[in-house]
Amino acid sequence: MSRRVWPKREDEELTSLVQHFGDRRGKDGKWAEISKRLPGRTNKDCRKRWFHSLDPALRKGRWTKEEDEILLSAYQRLGPAWKEIALLIKGRKDDQCAKRYNDILNPLAKDRLKNWSLEEDQYLTAKVNELGHRWATIAAGLPGRPPLTCRNRWRRLSKGLSSMGGLSSTDLTSSPDALSSSAFISTPREPAGLSSQATDNQTPNESHLLETDSTQISPSVPENPALSPLFSIEDLSPSTLEATVRQQLPDIQSCIEP
């Protein structure tokens, strides 16, 4: 399957082709005919783009309590039969149901909002460096951290480091110990009046989604000179940075907004 971004022109052409050939699945489907008219796109590319992004019947946005209840009940009866489960929830597709359950509703994901440890952040960084954005594979090594949570944690780390001394996500993956120089061991915070489920009550497959599972990143901790904005991260070796943060970890955590 192609990972190439779909430009507006191709979306419009695909929509026109589906209107002409129909969107049936299985042996009666015309996806082979459709893909022939879109160079570089496979049958699966076209089918997934239509059903998961362009289909007018697709429901996006927040999941309701009723939808979650149907999903949980259906999973208990059917297991991970996502296509069958999706038929029970109007407007939701199989991949939406799978991601909603695995990332949010699965009892194994109940600890996804707990504090991230220094070791977890370093493991995440090392694995992104090794595997890229293969979040399901990375999450397998972080019990209680679903793929979506890992992806969002990585985005926060990258954004936070970019605000400190010009560090980028490239710097982070090339030197995971750079994590030790910042107060990224954050305490999760949910918006007032929202439960953890309500906080995550959004469609996981939307590209702009960020799960609200931690506080705002504090870019500096003035009480610790090694973490001061006036102190250059480049002046310390990774081992010294890590030793400093490990020693000051209680102070760092106490400085982060609860």
Image (cartoon, rainbow, N blue to C red):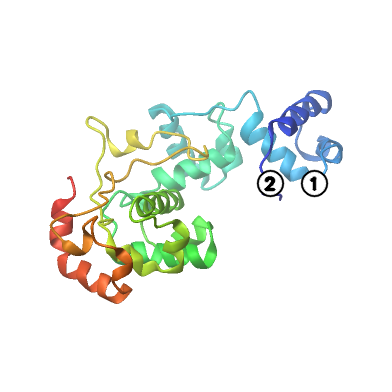
Q: Nearer the viewer, residue 190 or 100?
A: 190
The C terminus appears in which quarter of the rendering? top left
Q: Of the residues shown, which amino acid type is indicated by label 1?
A: Gly
Task: For residue 32, say whether it is visible.
Answer: yes
**Circles 2 and 1: CB atoms closer than 8 Å:** yes
Q: Which of 65 and 31 is in front in this view?
A: 31
147 left or right, relative to 18 = left
The residue where tag 2 is placed is 4
Residue 29 picture quarter: top right
Residue 224 picture quarter: bottom left
Q: Which residue is drawn at 45% across and 43% down?
A: 101
- Label 1 environment density (alpha carbons within 10 Å; few <14, some 14–19, many ≥20): few
Q: Which of 191 and 251 is in front in this view?
A: 251
Q: Which residue lies furthest to the front in this view?
A: 230
**Which secondary structure, mark 1?**
loop
Task: For residue 76, say whether it is visible.
Answer: no
- Label 2 environment density (alpha carbons within 10 Å; few <14, some 14–19, many ≥20): few
Q: Residue at x 23, y 29 (%)?
A: 193
Q: Compute the Cα span from label 2 to label 1.
A: 9 Å
Question: From the viewer's perspective, is residue 175 above or below residue 204?
Answer: below
Where residue 120 appears, as percent x and y from the top left, is 34, 63
Of pointers 2 and 1, the one earlier in the residue sequence = 2
Q: Which residue is drawn at 42% across and 50% down?
A: 155
51 left or right, relative to 146 = right
How many marks the image carries: the answer is: 2
Where residue 214 appears, as percent x and y from the top left, is 29, 46
The residue where tag 1 is placed is 40
Q: Of the residues shown, which amino acid type is indicated by label 2?
A: Arg
